[in-house]
Image (cartoon, helix red, strand yellow):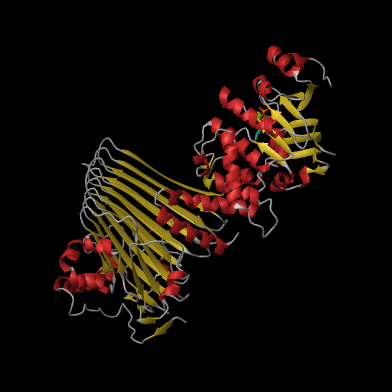
Amino acid sequence: MLLEEKPSVRSFLDSPEEAGEEFPDWYKNSRRDAWKSFQEIDWPKRSDEAWRFANLKKLSYEDLYDAKEVACNDIDRLVASALSLKENAGQIFFVNDRVVASPSLNEEFSKKGVIFKPLSQALIEDGDLVQNYFMTQNSRLGSAKYAALHRARLRNGFFFYVPKGVSLTVPVEVFHWVSGNSSSIFPHSLIVAGAGSSAMVAEYVTSIDDEISFCCGVSDIHGEENSELIYLRAQNLSEKAQSIHLLSTRAGLNSKLKTFNLDLGCEWVRNESVSRLVGEGASSEILAVSVPEKSQEFDMRTLQLHEQPNTSSNLLYKNTLYDDSKTIFAGMIVVEDEARHTDAYQTCRNLLMSDTCEANSMPGLEIKADQVKCSHGASTSPVSEDELFYLQTRGIKEPAARQLLTFGFVKEAVDCLENDFLEEVILGKLERRFKKIGVK
Amino acid sequence: MSTLEIKDLHASVNGTEILKGLSLSVPKGEVHAMMGPNGSGKSTLAKVMAGHQDYEVGSGDVFLDGKSLLEMDVDERSREGLFLAFQYPAEIPGVSNANFLRAARQARLPDGEEIDAVAFYQEMYDKMAKLGIDKKFTGRSVNEGFSGGEKKRNEVLQMMMLEPKYAVLDETDSGLDIDALKIVAQGVNAMRSEERGFLVITHYQRLLEHIVPDHVHVLNEGRIIRSGPKELALELEEKGYDWLKEGELVKS
Ligand SMILES: Nc1ncnc2c1ncn2[C@@H]1O[C@H](COP(=O)(O)OP(=O)(O)O)[C@@H](O)[C@H]1O
Ligand SMILES: [Mg+2]
């Protein structure tokens, strides 16, 4: 094994974990408040609208502990097996929420004032800047309790700050690995794209072993005016893991934000995505692909919130379901009174690869403004017989034809990124995934 | 032996018989045209030969160089040398034209053998150029958002890449303007050879000015009611189909 365990275990439900002396006061207080909130807020119930269809039996945390520190002596091997970027502007590596190798950032960008460092370090070195953006977005989709838990227990993550006018033409990359039985991690991703800046981020959350683990992550993205940002999060935790991820984007004046969630691993996943369009002319693209098999269950809740005029958002979620897997998609578009001339689209497509999988889609719309173009739709179907027939008439055998079609199905969402760096990473991971699942 | 031979074929869809004893033989080296009014069963014949599951074959058979096609799976028929250019080609989102053609070519190689990617791309680009298809179509999803004419050219490109023994072209002229029609006809003509037979299904004599057939067959209500030389197409253009329908079945 690569890793060597050191002792120190504690169930995260039992007691708070205070921030160390070295952290700023505001942060220590935030952590204490969060623990209080966590204890006050009720656990989700099935009767909650935001948890409709969710299988709450999957949630039980009595036996979960903060992940232990482990010594990692072969980071290169881990990176090599990670199907990551060929080129990057900087990298940070975590195992169990601890930095395990020296973070890097291309000098060209650090000279221009770009900050890309572990959050634990940023809280101390850039505390005031972090404070402006840290956990400022309300949880709106049912997971306030988890947001509080995250804030109370987070140990690390990264802070990526791109100053005004700076462009990174190559993505930065963040690796999270989890190791050990009953390990819990709380990775925090805080991304700020300053006015007129542009950047890309790829983040991977992966298990090293096939143990039970829990990941409760928050990613907050702030796009200031005229900024452009693309964020990829690829989750491939163990088949016994559970993951809750709360993603929020705040798109300022004429900014363009794109997010992509790739979910492959975990027995249970809850993803919430809130896309706020807070400046005129802002646009958001919200993309996701998931490929569950066996009895995996992925629960996805989204909100596209148009607060200003001339904003646009486009959501495309694609799920390919095998075996007895289950997906839940609940999407909501809200167009506020002032948000005239809004374009908002929401599509969830499910490809059923078995008779026993289950895809639930609940698209929703709430329009309070005039002159708005909105559409939402969901579709659920098996592989098209017509498409299959067409491929077979060209001599392609049925299993290969099915693979082409399922890959094509998810690739449509990947193509929307229009970013070669990230597309290559995603397609590589999907290829490996489909190969592993094989022909069913 | 070197023929595509359709023998007394009866086929139905949803319990309705569409092909009612159709016989036709296309030897290698020849181009046969099939004409006939709307709904006479032309596309049905094409799809039955390709193996579409909606069509049930009651009796009769189709032989490709002596082997029964109807015994084979859909993909096997293609690898055996049959090609169908569809009247309405399917759209396949997310699968690029290049990957699709590559998979089709790969399927023809023995297990473990990999296609030579460089040579493949070169060949594909050459053939696309012949058909006036822009290079960017390699990266686009198969037929998705293509115009009617672009889809038809794409069918012919597939035929050129797969080099079948027998090609059935179902209304490949519809949706093409006159210039595109000429380009497509040139592509087909360049593939005419002693080693290949064509069955060209069309509504209009127009196509047959450019792809001159050796024989013309007229299909009506699921049966060939007349076969003749290429001039028959001209006659049909002038008189319509009614003069044939009323008369007796005439064999050439
Ligand atoms: N899948 C189908 N379901 C029901 N009827 C069909 C189907 N396919 C063809 N038909 C019927 O079979 C007849 C022949 O159709 P087709 O072969 O498409 O004619 P053509 O190509 O000569 O115009 C028509 O009456 C058509 O409505
Ligand atoms: Mg037809």
Q: Position of residue B138 (x, y in %)?
A: 53, 43
Is A81 placed left or right of B177 in the picture?
left
A69 over B124 or under it: above or below: below
Task: Give the camera-side residue of A29 and B181.
Answer: B181
Left or right placement of residue A60 versus residue A437 in this view: left
Location of residue B51 by image quarter = top right
Side (left or right) of A288 relative to B134 = left
Residue at 46% x, 71% y is A238
At horizontal 53% and vertical 62% (from top left) the residue drawn is A324
Q: Residue furthest bottom?
A: A7
Q: Does residue A35 show up?
A: yes
Q: Quadrant of ligand 2?
A: top right
Which one is nearer the viewer's eye here, A93 or B11? A93
Q: Is residue A50 visible?
A: no
Residue B233: percent from the left, percent from the top? 72, 18
> Is A403 positioned to the left or the right of B246 in the image?
left
The image shows residue A63, relative to residue A129, as above or below, that is below
Instruction: Place residue B44 in its image quadrant.
Output: top right
| Image-quadrant location for residue A393 | top right
Q: Nearer the viewer, residue A413 or A242?
A: A413
Looking at this view, is A102 or B42 the one in front? Answer: A102
Q: Is residue B154 above or below residue A23?
A: above
Q: How many marks?
A: 0
Residue B155 position, x and y percent, is 61, 36
Quadrant placement of the C terminus of chain A: bottom right
The percent coordinates of residue A171 (x first, y second) are 34, 59
